[in-house]
Image: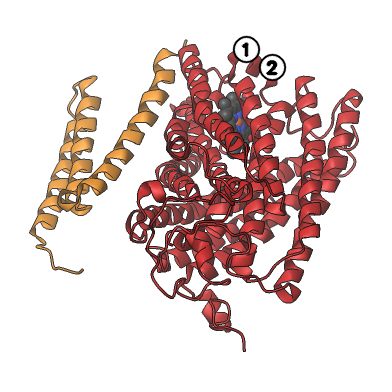
Amino acid sequence: MTERNYLTADYTLRSWFFTTDHKRIAILYFASLTMFFFIGGAAATAMRIELATPQADLVSDDIYNRLFTMHGIIMVWFFLIPSIPNTLGNFIVPLMIGARDLAFPRLNLLSWYVFMLGGSVTLFAILAGGIDTGWTFYTPFSTLYSNSYVMVAAAGVFIAGFSSILTGLNFIVTIHRLRAPGLTWYRLPLFIWSLYATSVILVLATPVLAITLVLIAVERFFGVGFFDPRIGGDPLLFQHLFWFYSHPAVYIMILPGMGVINELISCFSRKQVFGYKFVAWASLAIAALGFLVWGHHMFVTGQSLLASLVFSFMSFVVAVPSAIKVFNWTATLHKGSLRFDAPMLYALAFIGLFTIGGLTGLFLACLAFDVHATDTYFVVAHFHYIMVGGMVTAYFGGLHYWWPKITGRLYSEYWARAAAILIFLGFNLTFFPQFVLGAEGMPRRYHVYPPEFQVWNVLSSGGATILAAAYLLPLFYLGYSVFFGARAPANPWDAPGLEWQTSSPPPEHNFDVQPVVTRAPYQYSRKFEAQPQNA
Amino acid sequence: MTQSRPSLPLVAAWLGLLGLLALTVTMAYVPLGAANAVVAIGIGITKAALVAAIFMELRHRDALTLLFAGAGLFWLGILLWLGLMDFLTRT
Ligand code: HEM
Ligand SMILES: [Cu+2]
């Protein structure tokens, strides 16, 4: 007989779709996000095939517009924003802080339903004919000149926003109220600090996006002038409001990844994270400062020079806390007892790729440089280095790290390392050429281009093929492990966090005995043995 | 958890909001030039304060909750401040 745990407790469909167990909800999210990831990926694949040649061969202009819009909308709102928070965060946060569940378990389930409703509405918009505004919904594409299913897609994003707010709220309250006895703020693992910072952004920024989308609807359907200058609107107001949400949102898409990296780097160096308090506060600093830089997306729009200068300066400031983290991770590696298991390979890849993404962000924050680079492939490469090279890599790293805890099974280390290495190579081959293309002036969002750009585009499309195959690999060996993998012990990596002190997979209520925390996180003995937080 | 609260403050706040609404509408027809906007915004802030204090029950809450509510307001301030910085200094 198998031991009773959260997976074996009940096998009915009802027990899944009406569950309030944070671990099962994490799995519902995991399945949904995997689906969205592959839908968004399919659009990317179609674009890369089209871009392999300078002429238009696969799709028309209109279809190409719809492809990149669908890719952006799905990847941003239906994969990246919920990715780590709603899957790994949902699963691990209560375990890490020694709680039985999140503060509001039913709200947690509601957030999944709301998310799925938003996702279905958006998918409907795509199937009904698509959207051609780009993921940014810029006016007047989305208002005056709209000729696609803009409002339906906007409604989908609007609905999904409530799921973000519910999750953010749930995490904030949980982290304030449900920490185990002895688990003071400075004893919290850094993953928790980063999710806390993420949640603050989710709660403060998402309503602004919601209102902005509503304003589009009001302008379109009732002719009230918000954005259209002919009826009294301001043509830049949309971009201000949109980026007031969306720049902080890019930090929603990277902070949880940074949080995961702390856990991985520390465990596989067998060392405490260097400068714990700096890293913890850097997360909150990023969350706060991230609200002060949005105008760097508007340098060439006719925004006032003073505003551009201030936003440019603040963009340099916001890079400081990110840099602190990168330096501290590197210092953590120093003199550690390094192990190169698959999660660590992802973590190391993250550090390098995130650094390239962040530094090129600083290039773009320079007014004079940005005039040349804006709306070119340089920008595309910049944000993919962070969002894919950074966040998606961290997501995979965290998934491998906590997989034994989540499923109670061990995966094939050989295949896991192979996938990690292939992802790293495929990623760089796909996106590094795009920096070159951008520097040479190839604009983004076009599907025909002068023949001299073809070499770099072919390299990029070739890399994308490798990357796509590498992203498919885990589906097989992780899937295989669920049925045929060896049983995982409670603490396969010998890590000190509370989540490893309960069985794998955890029982329904996480801990048989309420853990009491007695020491800081990330403690290892001289012989590199983990010192559990509750021993 | 569920303690019954006197509904008097709620009713009073609601009547107050209706009164302020009437005031907004009336003032909109009194020609004050630029001062019209000031008056309208002033009334708007009063309404928001009523909602926050009474309907959202912030007047009964502890410091942490007030801090979060204040943060929401502060963030709105950032949006207006940096947003206006563009509008007011555009050439
Ligand atoms: C080190 C901090 C960062 C700086 C200084 C920075 C700077 C910039 C600048 C100036 C642009 C505008 C370029 C243009 O359109 O001309 C930009 C675009 C972008 N950045 Fe960053 N960035 C940073 C970090 C990030 C992070 C962490 C993410 C995501 C997780 C991100 C995602 C994006 C996206 C999605 C765009 C393009 C949006 C679009 O136009 O579609 N950036 N960045
Ligand atoms: Cu930005």
Q: Give percent across and percent down for residue A363.
A: 64, 20
Q: Colour of chain B?
A: orange
Crowding around mark 2 (Cα neighbors within 10 Å: few <14, some 14 to 19, many 20+) is some
Quarter of the figure that contains the N terminus of chain A: bottom right
Q: Is residue A491 visible?
A: yes
Whether label 1 touches label 2, CB < 8 Å: yes
Instruction: Residue under label 1, please give it.
Output: A368
- Residue nearer the viewer, A166 or A222: A166
Q: Colour of chain A?
A: red
Gap in Å between the C-alphas at discs 1 and 2?
7 Å
Crowding around mark 1 (Cα neighbors within 10 Å: few <14, some 14 to 19, many 20+) is few
Give, as a three-letter code, the residue at label 2.
His
Residue, x 62% and y 38% (percent of image)? A335
Q: Is residue A158 above or below residue A453?
A: below
Q: Give percent across and percent down for residue A339.
A: 69, 49
Instruction: Residue under label 2, please give it.
Output: A372
Q: Give percent across and percent down for residue A433.
A: 81, 30
Asked if disc 1 is less than 8 Å from ligand 1, the answer is: no
Q: Which type of secondary structure does the marked residue at label 1 adopt?
A: helix
- Residue nearer the viewer, A354 or A437: A354
Q: Which chain does tag 2 point to?
A: A
